[in-house]
Image (cartoon, grey):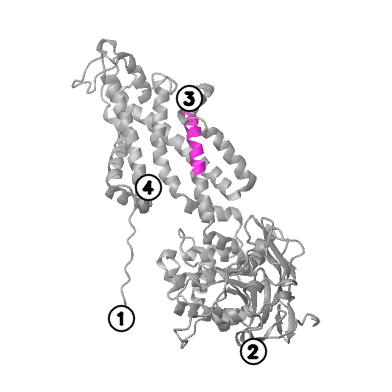
Amino acid sequence: MAIEVPVARRTSLLRALWRHRSSKVGLILVGFTLFVALIGPFLVLGNASSDPNYQNLGQSLLGSSGSHWLGTDDLGRDELVRMVNGARYTLIMAVAAVTIAAVSGLIVGAVSGYAGGWVDLVIQRLVDIILSFPGFLLALALVAILGTGMTNLIIAVAVSAFPRFVRVTRSGVLTVMQLPYVEAARSQGLPPLRILRKHVVPNALGALIVQTPLEIGSAVLTGAGLGFLGLGVAEPTPEWGAMLGDGRDLLFTNPTLVTYPGIAIFIAILGFNLLGDGIRDVLDPRHSTSR
Amino acid sequence: MTSLLSVRDLRTAFNGQTVLDGVDFDLHPGKTLGLVGESGSGKSVTALSVMGLLDRNGKVLPGSSIKLEGQELAGLSERGLREVRGKRMAMIFQEPMSSLNPVYTVGDQVAETVRKHLGLSRRASRERAVELLRMVGISAPERRVTEYPHQLSGGMRQRVMIAIAISADPALLIADEPTTALDVTIQGQILALLKELQERLNMAILMITHDLGVVSQIADDVAVMYAGQIIERTEAQRLVGNPAHPYSRGLLASVPRLGMDRNVPLPSIPGSVPSPADWPAGCRFADRCEFATPQCREKPPLLIERWPGHEVACDHPLVDGVPTPEPAREVVS
């Protein structure tokens, strides 16, 4: 008689995240932000004010209405159109910066942990130096040196997020290197780089995967903060932080001009943070805090 | 008979602290040598020294010699060692549960070594992997190659590890407590498999274990290790029947047997292996030995062939469980 062996069903990460309460909210918020960034600009097409930079001083500082759902700003630009277009800048900036930081942090951290000795020592002390500056301050200083603009903003945010990825990867690599299968791989005569690439790094990625969405959240905040200070992308680009900064002077007369971009930033950051927490819970059920 | 692996005066230190203190042994082609001892006696360090797998803090000291098929491995570069490892000598480990990488299929991992050492194509190494899994007694290997390690039992995983180890047809297999983590019936199967593969591939096995049962099942010769040295060396059957070193006798006596009187406590050796920092000047076992004399604590005994094919490092070797009275130090080895 054959005994039926139960096979554990492989659930996809997305499915597991959807089942988890807080990451479900995270998925919805991130999904909404992505949707707005990708499709939004096409949805608001149709009239002259569909151009985020179309000014109409005769219609400045209007409240919500059928033709301008979220009103207009001090130059008569449609607030909704600018918000929807701004989603792209914020997301591209945050995702690009975190991708650069994660990939370079992964490589540097893996080499640091695997090589050990003085290589590790030098890399870790350099990382210490970067970490000794508060992230935002470092990004601010870098933008001050490099100048404003999208590329420089991405570099600045990437540099400030980079050392945390190095740390996370290195500690993962150190843990995995203790495991017997790495010794087994060495006993089979495999070369070090191959062992690092095939046997160590894939098993050390967990913490990095959890770290990534959380870093995207904080990159959104850093980017918006720099934009608010006028150090982000140049005017008149409708970046959320910059819009928030522009609205600051009219805070008492037209509070909606700071409220809408603020809500947008809030939604994006909350979404990525909830998603990050959810990924952590799903990938490592032992550390689960809430369901 | 020329030896396949010849270890002479092997000394290994961790952070400057000597832990292996002059280990000598020979392993002949197609034979099995059991390396026996308690935790901390240096048997695993011996295996890692031979493989060149000591971690950063460990070093084989100059003057040591490890010859595999006549080639000196002590002092060989990491690159040189990589050419030997996996190809001419391979190793299996104690924890089959974690000796396989969880993120790749079994087939990938077997094929990886095959491709590295035999230079086969992706497809051919895949076929060879199936063949190897069949050789180590895994049923339906065509299906197993697509499975992940977590889908296999401990015994199965150890079989996969053996398949990886023999993939390049090595002359020497070092097995570091390969059955310790497995239950008894599986232990027997794995030992039988190793024996069968040994005959088929004419492979020498260095079996590291603390289990004298394993030794009597599989080994031709035994070397007993204590505090970084070999203290007795002879044929496996002879050691089990006539241990000459009080330590070997103690090890044998502490193995439970069926039909023992349950009211009599199992004999044990008092104390534990002295740590390398506290090795005494004389016999390192003297403090735990019921037959120790004051002279034993002064001069270290040498490993001397007392009987044909039976070496022992004890000045009062046991004959039928009784120590010989006067020191026989003058015997020329």
Q: Chain of mark 3?
A: A
Q: Is residue A89 above or below residue A230?
A: below
Where is mark 1, residue-wise? A1
For badge 4, the amino acid type reads: Arg
Task: Give the SS element for disc 1.
Answer: loop
Quick check: is A161 in the magenta stretch? yes
Nearer mark to the viewer, of 2 and 3:
2
**Callout 3 touching callout 4 (CB < 8 Å):** no
Task: Give the SS element for disc 2.
Answer: loop
Where is mark 2, residue-wise? B320
On-image quarter of the C terminus of chain B:
bottom right
Where is mark 3, residue-wise? A140
Secondary structure mainly formed by the magenta segment: helix
**Callout 2 touching callout 4 (CB < 8 Å):** no
**Callout 2 touching callout 3 (CB < 8 Å):** no
Left or right of B8 in this view: B100: left
Where is mark 4, residue-wise? A280
Measuring 32% from the left and 31% from the top, which residue is drawn there? Answer: A266
